[in-house]
Amino acid sequence: MQKAKMFSVLPTLLTLGNAVCGFGAITFAAKVGPTTLGGRELVTAALLIFLAMVFDMLDGRAARWAKHTTDFGAQLDSLCDAVSFGIAPAFLMLQFVRHETPLGDGTNWQLLFPRLLWVIAALFVLCVLLRLARFNVETEEEDMHEEFSGLPSPAAAGTVASFPIAMHGLRNLAEEADTFSQQLVVWLSPAMKVSLPFITLALACLMVSRVRYPHIFNQLFRGRRSRQHLIQLVFTAAAVVLVGEMAVPLIFCYFSFASPVRAAWKELIANRLRGDALSRLLPPKK
């Protein structure tokens, strides 16, 4: 009995670990964490969001392994996700755009549009809350989670958190004596700052969309692997080896935006085929 009780506590502890990571990400991004990190606060906040993703991935599996899935655990999981994958990445985006190196002409462009940035961050948080509420209502307990309706909030948070990690890689690259590397950093650094708020807005829209997204973990580890999955893994590993930390936003952006692009392309082709079929049915114009 005591052993069973210990197993039932484990999923709750993992879920609470998710919340602690989200809270830690906010405090480090705000530079009010338990210690100073010498300019690495945003990278630490981003890594904590990724650690929260690990806890979120493990808590449900631990509950099913212990055969102790409850409504309490599901609701607690969503509350913790709202902190780690909603509030934390939105605040991290604001801090990343606000405190990173200004543009080449010395203009901090984000100071000219503070309300726009705040609105984008607020919309991201609201869409995460809507996404989590819809998931709780529409998902049944015996659902195998082969696909998601709308971009999962952990993937959206990971996409936002990947940019500070890539920026850290750019800083390390800038320390090299290679002139090409330094020029690449000068170009990429402001480009990442300018693009992240608009990427965050697009992620918010995708979370509340009906675009179908695959469940990567289940497809890879439940015996449903295909040649396409193997090719994707090979290219992912190659990207990580070639460009290091800068591969992280590329991987997450691919996952976030490849599905809607494919869906739009299929819809375009279907509309064109319907149009061609209708034109063949109609009598020719005289």
Image: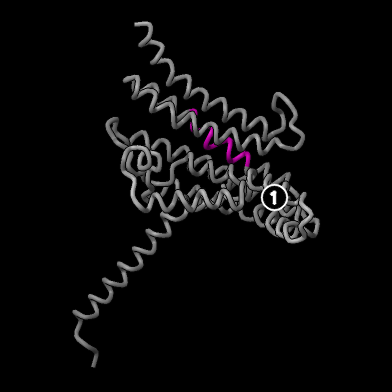
In this view, the residue in front, 261 or 271, is 261
Residue 83's place in the image compared with 266, above or below, is above
Q: Which residues are magenta?
A: 80-92
Q: Position of residue 254 (x, y in %)?
A: 49, 53
Q: Amino acid at mark 1?
A: Leu
Residue 36's place in the image compared with 103, above or below, is above
Name the outermost residue toward the top. Answer: 2
Q: Is residue 110 visible?
A: yes
Residue 73's place in the image compared with 145, above or below, is above
The image quadrant that residue 27 belongs to is: top right
Q: Position of residue 81 (x, y in %)?
A: 48, 32
Residue at image position (52%, 52%) is: 253
Residue at image position (38%, 64%) is: 265
The image quadrant that residue 264 belongs to is: bottom left
Residue 274's place in the image compared with 141, above or below, is below
Q: Position of residue 86 (x, y in %)?
A: 53, 37
Q: Horizontal placement of 150 versus 106: left or right?
A: left
- The N terminus, quarter of image: top left
Q: Position of residue 252 (x, y in %)?
A: 51, 48
Q: Is residue 70 visible?
A: no
**Mark 1 crowdedness (10 Å alpha carbons): few <14, some 14-19, many ≥20:** many
Residue 83 belongs to the span the image colors magenta: yes
Name the residue that disc number 1 marks: 170
